Image: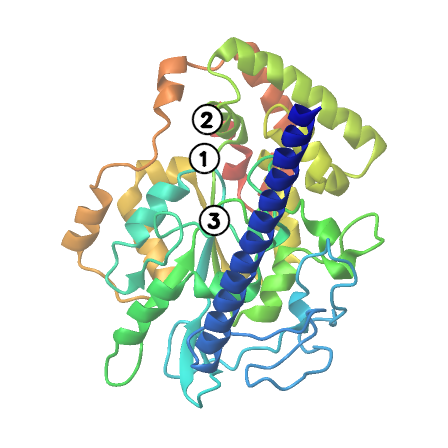
């Protein structure tokens, strides 16, 4: 009996100690949280952080803290604000930036709470895509130009904001804990902004930077959580509309490869399989899924739907270039785009670098400089594809047949037969 009392007493004391420990830990953590919050607020008051201020509903506030109304202007879409927590930030609620005239790159002043102005910048150009079309190699050579700066993204190239991070998505199925805001996107380009700010010729800042995320051209799967698309069967607002609200006359470079070859390289690179036989098997499955969807839904719905994207065993939809390009051309004029073929780029890198630099309106480099940049080692070659061996002929026939309708549409849009890729077959 005495033993039971002793045990009961010890258990009670143990539980009391545990509870006290939990309380103390909670106090410490809350104190740490308050300390961090105070630190962040202090930084904001000192003018150190973030370009924009939002209220809890993401209604528009100007850079000086003054409330703005619904945003109109070039776009017909106005500010709706986030009506649900699962929605992405409403970019149409942002006040349009007043870009600085002494900067070639689109930069603007952020009025800080200490009274000083901070310079912030958005990209001058986007290398929109497409995955496994040589964008990493091209962007590395673009960065070799002395007037083009790298930012803080992956290899100074990819930011993943417009296609994934702003929706809280990853490249495949996994989700992130938070949805990235425009202010965070701009803040992550701090390195490029500082280099642009330091480069000045007679008071004019002539350096630029770009975003080379190759998913931005085609990855529209976050459309359902854009506030303006709420309740719609198909999207009215996509990435091009959002960019048009923020940017000033942006430039877009698109590198396109034979979609059949692109898919095989992408399949090996993404680790979906390592042999021509597994690729053939997954191609059959993907064709069945997407053709079934086409029979029951519109092509736009099938290519933009997140669930379909995740269900496909290969990223076969990415090669339907014409469908995605139509969305971009519906918002931006044709002069905003430089569209190149991977096959042509690989055959004559030097000539294509001249085209790119002319398009970006940067200083013309000497022939020796261009030759040196063109002669550098190729970036991001899929070595596993070389080990896997060539695609099966019957797989190629199936894919060529599937993509032919989209290649025909692309050739008609661009008025160039080379986008049929008939010379590559």
- The structure residue drawn at horizontal position 73% and vertical position 53%, both measured from the top left corner, is 86
Q: Quadrant of residue 211?
A: bottom left
- The structure residue drawn at horizontal position 17% and vertical position 47%, both measured from the top left corner, is 372
> Could you tell me how far apart the alpha carbons at marks 2 and 1 are, in whole angstroms?
7 Å
Q: Which residue is mark 1?
A: 132
Q: Which residue is mark 2?
A: 265
Instruction: Say left or right for 239 vs 273.
Output: right
Going from N to C along the chain, the mark reached first, 3 or 2, is: 3
Q: Is residue 250 visible?
A: no
- Pointer 3 local density, CA inside 10 Å: few below 14, some 14–19, many at least 20: many
> Could you tell me how far apart the alpha carbons at marks 3 and 2 are, in whole angstroms?
18 Å
**Residue extending farthest bottom:** 115
Mark 1 and mark 3 in contact? Answer it, CB < 8 Å.
Answer: no
**Residue extending farthest left:** 368
Q: Which residue is mark 3?
A: 213
- The structure residue drawn at horizontal position 68% and vertical position 30%, both measured from the top left corner, is 5
Residue 314 at what x, y percent from top left?
Answer: 59, 25
């Amino acid at each position: 009996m005495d033993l039971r009392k002793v045990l009961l007493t010890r258990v009670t004391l143990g539980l009391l100690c545990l509870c006290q420990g939990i309380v103390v830990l909670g106090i410490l953590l809350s104190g740490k949280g308050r300390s961090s919050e105070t630190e962040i607020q202090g930084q904001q008051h000192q003018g150190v952080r973030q370009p924009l201020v939002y209220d809890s509903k993401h209604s528009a506030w100007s850079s000086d803290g003054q409330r703005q109304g619904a945003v109109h202007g070039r776009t017909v879409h106005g500010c709706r604000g986030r009506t649900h927590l699962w929605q992405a930030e409403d970019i149409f609620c942002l006040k349009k930036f007043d870009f600085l005239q002494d900067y070639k790159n689109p930069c603007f002043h952020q009025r800080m709470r200490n009274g000083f102005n901070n310079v912030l910048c958005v990209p001058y150009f986007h290398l929109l895509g497409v995955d496994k079309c040589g964008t990493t190699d091209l962007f590395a050579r673009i960065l070799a130009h002395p007037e083009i700066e790298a930012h803080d993204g992956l290899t100074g190239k990819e930011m993943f904001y417009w296609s994934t991070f702003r929706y809280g998505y990853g490249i495949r199925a996994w989700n992130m804990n938070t949805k990235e805001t425009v202010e965070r996107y701009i803040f992550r380009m701090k390195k490029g902004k500082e280099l642009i700010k330091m480069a000045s010729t007679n008071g004019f800042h002539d350096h630029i930077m770009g975003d080379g995320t190759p998913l931005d051209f085609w990855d529209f799967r976050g459309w359902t959580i854009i506030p303006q698309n709420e309740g719609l069967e198909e999207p009215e607002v996509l990435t091009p509309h959002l960019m048009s609200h923020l940017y000033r006359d942006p430039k877009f470079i698109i590198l396109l490869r034979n979609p059949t070859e692109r898919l095989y390289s992408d399949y090996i690179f993404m680790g979906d399989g390592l042999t021509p036989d597994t690729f053939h098997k997954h191609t059959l499955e993907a064709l069945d899924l997407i053709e079934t969807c086409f029979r029951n839904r519109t092509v736009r719905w099938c290519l933009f739907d997140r669930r379909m994207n995740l269900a496909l065993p290969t990223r076969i939809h990415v090669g339907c270039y014409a469908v995605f390009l139509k969305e971009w051309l519906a918002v931006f004029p044709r002069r905003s785009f430089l569209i190149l073929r991977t096959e042509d780029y690989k055959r004559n890198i030097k000539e294509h670098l001249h085209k790119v630099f002319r398009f970006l309106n940067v200083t013309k480099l000497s022939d020796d400089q261009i030759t040196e940049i063109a002669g550098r080692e190729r970036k991001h070659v899929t070595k596993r594809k070389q080990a896997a061996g060539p695609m099966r002929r019957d797989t190629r026939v199936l894919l060529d047949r599937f993509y032919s309708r989209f290649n025909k549409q692309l050739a008609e849009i661009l008025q160039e037969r080379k986008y049929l890729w008939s010379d590559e077959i």
